[in-house]
Amino acid sequence: MKLKELLAEKRVVITDGATGTWLAEKGELLPGQPPELLNLSNPTAIRKAHQEYLEAGSEIITTNTFGANPFKLARLNLAEKTEEINRRAVLLARETRGDAQALIAGDIGPSGELLAPLGNLSAKELASGYRKVISVLEDSGVDLFLLETFSSIQEAEIIAETISKTSSLPIIVSLTFTLGKRGPRTLMGESPEDAIRISGNSIFGLGTNCGEGGRETITIISALKKETGLPLWAKPNAGRPRILEGKTIFPENPEDAATTAQELAEAGAKFIGGCCGSTPAHIRAIKNRLHNRIK
């Protein structure tokens, strides 16, 4: 099944939940350990996470490649492993999916660098660094590209344009906003209105993820809905995290996630899942709550 076919059914599409925080909660990920390294060192854990989300009702699962770009991996002295980590991630997702109808999204996160003139990274260097990642993900068999947790519209634009030059696969761009006196803004001060310019790269969908929880995400989706007719993607965190006895706690439980999902659907979201702190239980609750919308 293709992405357009899912949307043609006139229903909400259920995506997956968190990877890093879920692996950490299960004890598979050590504090400070990049989840992407488990593609090589503990592939069983990644397969299990994918399987749990599929069993919970996810119709799109994301590859464990959020930080698997050469800029972030270079900080770990692992830039030469970029291709292997990305290729293995897609293989693990495909092995787990098997003959199921779920789609696989090639997950691409930000570089962690500031673009010139604020930083030292040029647009050309950014595009060059991601070009190999894009090629490996597509060649390995992803069904779409997901650019998520971007706080710089310019960075997302450059990467989306790089994809569109070589691939015909759908592109979804998900930005991270926070709410302030001026309304939703990215870390770079950009608004939902500013985000619409990304559509010039012929992206398939636009949305938001991460943040401080469901209420914030509903506000952002409502703002994006006023600006674009593109299908909207929403994956909120399970609330604003806090530290309790040295452990990160996310306050929103699966029932909270289900309530949020219903309101997100009413606000116009077409793809709904969860980000940090969300688990397969959250996705299952969302699936159950939106059952009537999925028929």
Image (cartoon, rainbow, N blue to C red):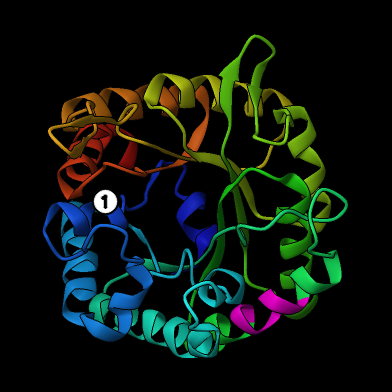
For this view, does 174 lie left or right of residue 270? right
| Circle 1 SS class | helix
- Determine the residue positioned at 46% across, 81% down: 86
Q: Where is residue 9 in the image (x, y as percent from the top left)?
A: 45, 49
> Which one is nearer the viewer's eye here, 159 or 122?
122
* Residue 196 picture quarter: top right
For this view, does 54 lie left or right of residue 157? left
Looking at the image, is 64 positioned above or below residue 91? above
Q: Is residue 85 magenta?
A: no
From this viewpoint, is residue 232 visible? no
> In this figure, which residue is indicated by the disc labeled 1?
21
- Determine the residue positioned at 79% across, 54% down: 119
- Determine the residue positioned at 67% across, 75% down: 130
User: Image quadrant for the N terminus?
Assistant: bottom left
* Residue 227 picture quarter: top right
Q: Where is residue 13 in the image (x, y as percent from the top left)?
A: 40, 47
Q: Where is residue 246 in the image (x, y as percent from the top left)?
A: 17, 38
Q: Which amino acid does label 1 sit on?
A: Thr
Looking at the image, is 192 positioned above or below residue 118? above
Magenta highlight range: 128-134
> Which one is nearer the viewer's eye here, 175 or 67?
67
* Residue 212 picture quarter: top left
Q: Does the magenta stretch include residue 133?
A: yes
User: Image quadrant for the C terminus?
Assistant: top left
Looking at the image, is 101 positioned above or below residue 42? above
Which residue, as the protein is rendered here, is positioned at the far right?
A: 117
